[in-house]
Amino acid sequence: MRTILIIGAGRSASSLIRYLLLKSESENLHIVVADLSLALAEKKINKQPNATPIALNIFDVEERKAAIEKASIVISMLPAYLHIEIAKDCLQFKKHLVTASYISDAMMELDEEARKNNLIFMNEIGLDPGIDHMSAMKVIDEIRSKGGKMLLFESFCGGLVAPESDNNLWNYKFTWAPRNVVLAGQGGAAKFIQEGTYKYIPYGSLFRRTEFLEVEGYGKFEAYSNRDSLKYRSIYGLDDILTLYRGTIRRVGFSKAWNMFVQLGMTDDSYIMEDSENMSYRQFTNSFLPYHPTDSVEIKMRLILKIDQDDIMWDKLLELDLFNPNKKVNLPNATPAQILEKILTDSWTLEQDDKDMIVMYHKFGYELNGEKKQIDSKMVCIGDDQTYTAMAKTVGLPVAIATLLILNGKITTPGVQLPINKEVYLPILDELESYGVIFNEQNMPYFGYNPDLF
């Protein structure tokens, strides 16, 4: 019996646990689900055979090491900053490790020792990062195998509400960590390269510089730039590429509306608002508006944002209950961003019967035999329900499949890595198709720079 230890039983672990439980008998697996909450671990296992729920405090060193020592392979579904101690224990006890998180500098420092011990520390094997890497490298490698030269690569991904559950004016609900949505784009200017020229978008302009996308059967979307589109340039082997851009997908109109919060300062997370616990939603809103002896909060808001009363932007603000004098923030020592997150969560939490949706879109521009060409690759995944969401499916399934491939000796390259090699991405993408994670590729006219037009 081979033991797979899963540390962390949160929302993203649902599809991961179900996949491994379904494989447990044929693959001779015993699944140990460890979480600080024993009740949550028990719920995820649901009394299935070949599985054991355990309560685990990862800050209890002896308890953590004991669990890892007994495992054949370890999956960490904890927040990224908590992986490192688990990784060090995996080195000590010679265990492979799989995570869905970005490779941190601390994790990368373990690469040499992992290689020496022939251990695989597979990271960035979720959705984004994860499926984005694999689906991109598959097409890029195919283009290169034909002798093509990459000219353009644009990649977009977004967690959205499914069309059948899209019933608010923002066309958006939280499908993942709300805090990440509120703080998106902060921490420096977005940077990318376009036709060989480096471009920068400061945070204050980020949500007014969008690219439009069309997905057959699902309509129009928009995308705003990720903070660092150049992070994977060398990793993908695209150092000479003319255009490289990565962005986040939303429904058309979201970014323009979100920009109102940015301009007001409501997304700021750098300072604490006085007496935030007793503040009403209306008082919070008024905090960012100038004083006027007679104008109401509503009038001041429309004036400062230059919104007409019949503008859809105004209806979007009203829908969020921002002007309610009776609703209390109830958050002590809170930042503006934390309070905005609380207000938005009231309106944007998925209902019991709601479904979420993942949209991923890649554009590949290349030159082959003197001719410029383009491939567009699109994927849409709809969640089943509130447990097996599209987000849980697209994050958890690649983790689960990779774990089994490592355990079965199908992935053998040691070290700290992400899934950009064929031995990793080909079998995972192939199996994901059976779960509805399918990329549709289309040959398109090349939309890059044309010197004949200038």
Image (cartoon, rainbow, N blue to C red):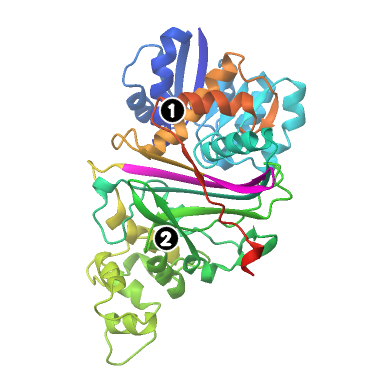
Residue closer to the observer: 238 or 191:
238
Residue kind at label 1, given as amino acid type: Glu
Asked if disc 1 and disc 2 are in contact, CB closer than 8 Å, the reply is no
Residue at point 34% right, 74% down?
Answer: 285
> Which label was assigned to residue 433?
1
Does residue 326 appear anywhere in the picture?
A: yes
First in residue order: circle 1 vs circle 2: 2
**Is residue 369 rendered magenta in the image?**
yes
At 74% from the left and 50% from the top, the residue drawn is: 240
Residue 143: x and y in percent read 63, 37
Task: Give the CA separation, mark 1 to mark 2.
Answer: 38 Å
Does residue 63 appear anywhere in the picture?
Answer: no
Q: Which residues are magenta?
A: 356-375
Residue depicted at 27% across the width and 80% down the height: 298
* Image coords of residue 268 (percent x, y): 49, 67
Q: Amino acid at mark 2?
A: Gln
SS at mark 2 in the image = helix
Q: Nearer the viewer, residue 93 or 152?
A: 152
